[in-house]
Image (cartoon, rainbow, N blue to C red):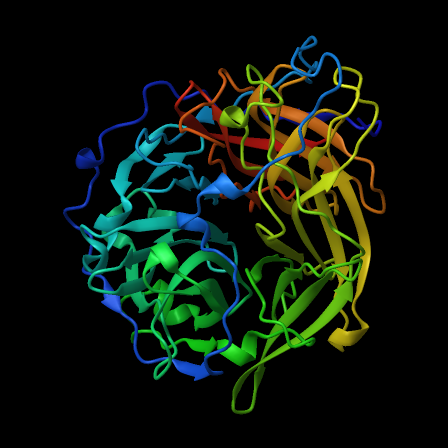
Amino acid sequence: MRRSSRLLCVLTGLAVAVGLLASPATARRERRPDGRTASRAIVYGRDAGVSSRKATSFDVFGRRTRPIVSAPGAAGASSPLLPLPVGAGFDALVDPLSKPSDTTGALGDSFYVAAVNTQMAVYDLTGVQVVAPIRLDLLHANSVGLFVFDPKVIYDQYLDTFLLVYLVQEDSPRLSRIMTVAIPNATANDPSTWCAVSFKGDQVTGASAVWADYPGVGFNETHVTITTNQFTFPTTTGRFRYSQVMTIDKVGLYDCNQPAPSPTVFAGTRTQDEKGRQAFTLRPAETVGSSPGPQLLTSFQPVKGKRDYLTIWRIRPTATGFALKRASKRTGKVSFPPLGTQGGGDVNDPDTWWDAGDHRFINAFYDADLNRIFTAHAVFRNLQPDTVTGVYPEAAVRWYEIDPAGRLSNSVVARRGIVGAPEVDVGWPTVATDSTGTLFVTYNRASAPHGEFLSAWVATIPPGSTAETQLLVHAGLSTYDAVQGPERWGDFNAINRDPLDGQNLAIFNQYASSSTQWQQFIGVVTDT
């Protein structure tokens, strides 16, 4: 493992929460105002061609594999890796019925808002739960009793507001919705002050019916941008059609006393990259800094050979509305990550392998003070030495720092690096910087050769460097074997900069708490 000379520590200002979870039925919902339905959108673009890409939320990983290890000792385990000491944090949400967890959340001035696949809750700064878990479908009348999934939470420090986004989908009758819930930081513990809005999941009229999957949420000073992958019905045979981008004025989105918001939408041919390929999993950047500028986004495109590339996108206001521009930059060959192994499992037993992610970026983060955008995904690496197995292909994290130019075609990939370790698999990375420009990456990690269960980790990379310092945030407690075949894990983690102290980062991660259960964990870390 490559390490810098810095020490990474976890702040001790958080108290461990014990017994904080309550039944969703106990959540305070009686005074929440009725949600609204968004007005008609302005749409740019038409229906695009079909690809073979699959919907994440309904995928089965039976097609995924990892190379078989036949070297002597491969099935054994050495002593566990020695982690750095961990400070305080707290266990947050848990749900025995949903897999994967889709853990997400954000830290505001006064509260944490956390969510997992089916529910959300609010905690104060000491980790005490102040709004008991609420089922996502109960947050708006248009989602009650329906299938809800893929929550994302961000904190908009420009207007001191959390935004929770989640999706609704039904095959019969066909239905897709994108739901938003704006939560003012000052009154996050009072659900009656929240503002819920419902958008059609398919914003393109007159085209083939599609449903929205795997959202991304970003913002700048004036607008929120929500991206989704659009698939045909039904989910069992859904085919990817195009990426959809909605940019929405915050005024109507955050305040239900204002007129309903009307999004500007880019879809179909308008979300093809400059090489004519349909972008898959566009990630809008969460923005920090005094001069945030236009909304930036990222996407990644694998190509056969060594011609893989990422694309940086920009939404800029014009005299007649908004324009979406893009520019692609080569990354060199990026190989697809193998499925990971975990402590207590055998490196050749697919029943205990776990999904570490794929080529999709999980989030994007724009540091406007540096004029740098950061993003990351899971990749294949062959890290050495493999002291236990002799040969072991790793799932690792690859991160990127992009310098966006005024003319996007002049943008450059200023820095890129790897987070990982020999005979260890890592995945589901999310990124953010602190106020000094240090990059933080939070991710999951496990290893059969080293006896490490699925755990929550964070790494820091100093400005101008590619050397990382890795810290164990919370160790896994058990081999995770919740389903037959490779384990679903992910599909998100989350990280954001503390709005009151720019050197602190809040992380929302997960670890294996038992053989069939994940556990969301919240902590605040700093680089000192």
Q: Is residue 181 visible?
A: no
> Taking 231 as reference, is 128 above or below it?
above
Q: Residue at x 65, y 66 (%)?
A: 291
Q: What is the quadrant of residue 498 in the picture?
A: top right
Residue 152 vertical position relative to residue 503 in the rendered view, above or below: below
421, 382: nearer the viewer: 382
Q: Give the vertical position of 247 relative to 29 (above or below).
A: below
Residue at horizontal 39 percent and vertical 24 percent from the top: 517
Question: Residue 275: which quarter of the image?
Answer: bottom right
Q: Quadrant of the C terminus?
A: top right
Is 498 left or right of 90, judged from the image as shown?
right
Q: Is residue 176 left or right of residue 501?
A: left
Q: Nearer the viewer, residue 120 or 89?
A: 120
Looking at the image, which residue sits at the far left? 30
Q: Position of residue 145 (x, y in %)?
A: 18, 50
Task: In the displayed orientation, state which residue is furthest to the top.
Answer: 79
The quadrant of the image that shows the N terminus is top right
Front residue of this view, candidates 96 and 156: 96
Residue 260: where, in percent of width, then height? 30, 74
Q: Quadrant of residue 121?
A: top left
Residue 417 visible here: yes
Please give left or right for residue 342 compared with residue 118 in the image. right
Residue at image point 77% right, 71% down: 405
